[in-house]
Image (cartoon, coloured by chain):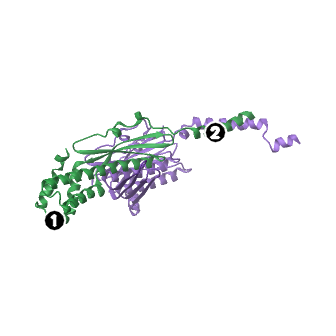
Amino acid sequence: MASNLSRGGYLTRGSLHHFSRLIIFGLGLILLNPTVILPQQQVPEWFAQLPEAPPKQLFAVGVAGKYLRPQRARAAALQDAYRNLAKQILVKLKFELIELSDGRLQITNPKFDLRYYDNRLDDIELNSVILDSVITAEGYFVIIAYPAEKKSGGFGCSLRSWGPAPEWVSHIPKDRDYVYGIGMVARYGRWLRAWQDADALARFDVAKNIQVEVQSLHTSQRDDRHTIESTTRRQSLDLTLRNATIIARWYDCKSDTYYSLCRAPRQ
Amino acid sequence: MKKLVVLLMLIPIALFLINCGAEKPKPKMANIPDWYLNPPQAEDAYYQAGDAVKMSMALAKDAADARARDAIARTIEVKVSTMMKDFMQQSGMGNDAEAIEFTSSVSKQVANNVLKGCKIVKREMKIEGNSYHAYSLAEYNLNSLVQETLDAARRQKALYNEAKANLGFEELEKEIQKLKQVGE
């Protein structure tokens, strides 16, 4: 009876031993696999730093996660590159940030609206050319050029690690001809989504650096003992950006933060 | 072995309880960027800093940027208002009610309408416990301010004409162009 119980209902000493071994084995696998602990170890050079495109031509990159079939990963990465190129050509941005604070309560409510013309996608798909594509442990990366030209040459496949923080992360570049913006996001579960959001936020940052509507109301109420200061702040923009390009990216492994640098010509 | 499993199960609970009891780390003065405490000063630009603490990094950045730009807008409103009043008093119409309204209207328009070319030039992100503390430094070029003031004054031209000024509008434009010198 006792042996039946121990076999059917309770863990025996032997099974516990196996269970603990399994846990240790699993932990060991996680610790030994750098892609689990530290994602984005190796990326193509042109993903971290977009090469300068020749005049009248645009470059854009696309990424996709892991797929069972490489063809599907390639198709997904290409679709992403086409979308990124469409956004690069023309993107309509609407942003509004409302902040209310009265000393006790603080509410910050941002709204983002990014639109691009997807009717251009067919044209981009027909008239673009793949310059390079790379499969890494994490996904598929592709770079395309639009419009395709006969002399469009491919790039050499070179992978790189992220390295130390580039200068633009803390000091936004200054240029007479271009406006720059930085997008940053952290603690994302999926790296694909993180890059998408960092890129989008970088475009909004460029737009805010060009033009933003600012309204605010500051009030101060005093009685014998207290002073209550309240602020109502609203900032908004409604802009169309042309040729806003994500020219550089950086991933901070220590803080799990994704950075994108966007550049747009002065309008 | 059983003890080991119990111990393994207790560790996360203990860590959770320790974390609950922990005080929120406060920012050390040494961690605050120098440019936040002492924003740079330049002859051709205004600088203002802003900061925000949020759980989301993106939100902290947006809020800090917004506060820095808001500080710029408030500085501009005061600056433009002072400069316009100076000009009005020099032209002998400073106490006129309509001239005061004109001055106030132009300065509010410049500050509250659209900030063109107000850039975030420096930014730092600090991690404080589970939150992000973003610091932003906004820069606004004085040339942009002159242009905005001119545009706002043009929009308010009708009001200005009603003020029965003894100076032509072109002269006012010239004076606004001199704002650079006044600002220095």
Mark 1 closeness class: few <14, some 14–19, many ≥20 residues within 10 Å:
some
Residue that badge 1 annotates: B161
Up-down: is B5 above or below B99? Answer: above
What residue is rendered at 26% in x and 51% in y? B78
Element under disc 2: helix
Look at the image and give the colour of chain A.
purple
Quarter of the image with the N terminus of chain A in it: top right
Quarter of the image with the C terminus of chain A in it: bottom left
What residue is rendered at 79% in x and 42% in y? A10
Q: Nearer the viewer, residue A238 or A100?
A: A100
B115 sits left or right of B89 in the view: right
Q: Which mark is residue B73?
A: none
B176 sits left or right of B78 in the view: left
Q: How many marks?
A: 2
Q: Residue furthest front?
A: A224
Element under disc 1: helix
Amino acid type, callout 1: Asn
Q: Is residue A131 visible to the viewer in this orientation of the structure?
A: no
**Circle 1 marks a residue in which chain?**
B
Chain identifier, green in the render: B
- Mark found first going from the N terminus, 1 or 2: 2
Q: Is residue B116 visible to the viewer in this orientation of the structure?
A: yes
Q: Nearer the viewer, residue A14 or B72?
A: B72
Residue that badge 2 annotates: B12
